[in-house]
């Protein structure tokens, strides 16, 4: 069914984008969790610890891809909303070129200084070796991973959100099947996990490229519009997303350092499990934000603030509601979830259960913050979006990590994330109310704020 952002009811457009985006993100999170499950089964708890330690470099490539992909795709949607459809190809071609350049530079730097990178993340001994085994295989494929991310953003905004979902789904299934074969059947350990992820990323990219051969949208896989003169505009809109990922990586490095120096490797393993379980909730929020973005950007370009308000309300309801469901489920089954990764008799289950329970306390607030940040990003107000992203992603988490363990020695370290989301939510609410006062006509205010 064709998507018409100009005339379709907002709820119809939202669900047309939501279900593919949500399905894709959920599936992606499940294969990350599946990775951790097979690594825990085939490599052991040290493998889970190594995964926690190598998330930061992974986040850097995700940050580059999301910055360019979301920035370029949002700008394309804004221009289409204004009626400037002929510029779409330029935004796409330049985003792909920019991603290729940035990700290649990052890969080369990481390969040259791999040992130093692993040491910087706090890894030592067996965990350092496992992290090395994983990254040495996967790093060269990060260029493909980054390009696939950007492709998915543009394919989704080129009125084909379902293909992005199919690509993610098939890639996820491929990853899990290969995890089982490489890790459990062939005993390849962390190298097997890396090869499974690499092959699945190539699969995702190839499926997304079919969008252009089938001519389902207006974009072409060509050199038309190639260049770098749109770089500043792409990066300005995409910067908040970059900060979300980079600050997430910085937060993990900080967590790893504090946990290793003040608590021990058992806390690193508990944290690794928490991040892998929490990725499901995080990606659901990303999916909801992705569903809102093209609709908000189009209507911002078309100067339709009342439709932006409607999609914002739908997005907030979906994010806060799903976050609350996650919270209830995890609090009911935290020991069972921890046992699935660590083994039912593992002595780390109580610690991991506490860590994951505290993390999910902040998930409803996380949803609120991410949807509000996405609003500002989608309407080309990157400063506000960046401020929210930095606040929830690093500033208040760092404050919590440094202060809360002193006040609450037992659980203060785990409470730092919900502390950061709560303080940021107060800031986000203030910024949202200010935006609505400025964007909605006084005569319509009573209708749209009810």
Image (tube, rainbow, N blue to C red):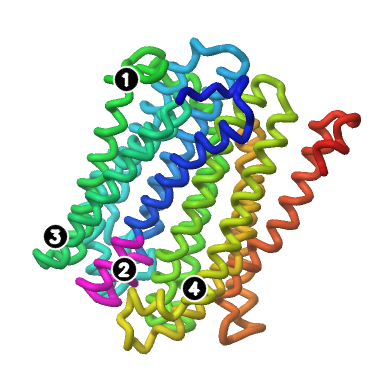
Position of the C terminus by quadrant: top right
Residue 163 rendering spot, x and y as whole percentages: 36, 33
- Looking at the image, is mark 2 or mark 1 earlier in the sequence? 2
> Which residue is labeled 3 in the image?
181
Residue 202 rendering spot, x and y as whole percentages: 23, 40
Image quarter for residue 367? bottom right
Specify the segment rendered in magenta: 33-52
Image quarter for residue 107? top left
The reply to whether callout 2 and callout 1 are in contact (CB within 8 Å) is: no
Residue closer to the observer: 234 or 116: 234
Residue 289 rendering spot, x and y as whole percentages: 56, 43
> Which residue is labeled 1 in the image?
221
Identify which residue is drawn at 49% across, 28% down.
72
Give the distance between the C-alpha atoms of the residues marked 1 and 4, in whole angstroms. Answer: 43 Å
> Which residue is labeled 4 in the image?
356
**Foreground disc of the pair 2, 1:** 1
């Amino acid at each position: 069914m064709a998507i018409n952002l100009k005339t379709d009811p907002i709820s119809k457009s939202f669900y047309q984008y939501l279900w593919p985006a949500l399905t894709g993100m959920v599936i992606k999170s499940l294969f990350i969790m599946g990775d951790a499950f097979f690594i825990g089964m085939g490599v052991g708890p040290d493998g889970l610890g190594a995964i926690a330690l190598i998330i930061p470099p992974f986040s850097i490539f995700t940050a580059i891809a999301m910055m360019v992909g979301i920035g370029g795709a949002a700008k394309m949607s804004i221009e289409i909303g204004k009626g400037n459809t002929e510029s779409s190809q330029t935004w796409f071609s330049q985003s792909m070129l920019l991603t290729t350049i940035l990700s290649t530079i990052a890969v080369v730097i990481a390969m040259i200084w791999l040992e130093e990178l692993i040491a910087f993340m706090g890894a030592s001994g067996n965990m350092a070796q496992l992290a090395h085994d994983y990254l040495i295989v996967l790093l060269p494929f990060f260029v493909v991973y980054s390009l696939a991310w950007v492709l998915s953003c543009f394919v989704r905004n080129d009125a084909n959100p379902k293909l992005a979902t199919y690509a993610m789904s098939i890639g996820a299934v491929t990853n899990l099947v290969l995890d089982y074969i490489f890790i459990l059947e062939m005993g390849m350990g962390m190298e097997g996990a890396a090869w499974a992820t690499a092959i699945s990323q190539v699969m995702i990219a190839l499926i997304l490229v079919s969008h252009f051969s089938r001519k389902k949208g207006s974009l072409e896989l060509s050199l038309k519009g190639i260049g770098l003169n749109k770089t500043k505009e792409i990066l300005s809109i995409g910067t908040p997303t970059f900060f979300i990922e980079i600050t997430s990586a910085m937060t993990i490095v900080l967590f790893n350092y504090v946990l290793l120096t003040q608590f021990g490797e058992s806390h690193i393993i508990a944290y690794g499990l928490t991040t892998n379980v929490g990725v499901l909730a995080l990606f659901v929020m990303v999916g909801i934000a992705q569903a809102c973005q093209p609709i908000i950007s189009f209507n911002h370009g078309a100067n339709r603030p009342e439709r932006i308000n409607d999609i914002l309300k739908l997005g907030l309801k979906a994010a806060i509601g799903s976050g609350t469901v996650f919270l209830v489920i995890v609090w009911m089954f935290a020991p069972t979830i921890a046992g699935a990764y660590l083994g039912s008799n593992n002595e780390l289950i109580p610690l991991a259960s506490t860590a994951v329970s505290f993390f999910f306390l902040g998930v409803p607030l996380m949803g609120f913050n991410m949807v509000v940040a996405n609003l500002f990003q989608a309407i080309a107000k990157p400063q506000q979006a960046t401020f929210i992203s930095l606040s929830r992603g690093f500033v208040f988490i760092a404050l919590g990590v440094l202060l809360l363990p002193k006040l609450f020695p037992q659980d203060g370290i785990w409470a730092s994330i919900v502390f950061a989301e709560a303080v940021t939510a107060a800031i986000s609410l203030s910024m949202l109310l200010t935006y609505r006062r400025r964007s909605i006509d006084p005569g319509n205010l009573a209708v749209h704020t009810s």
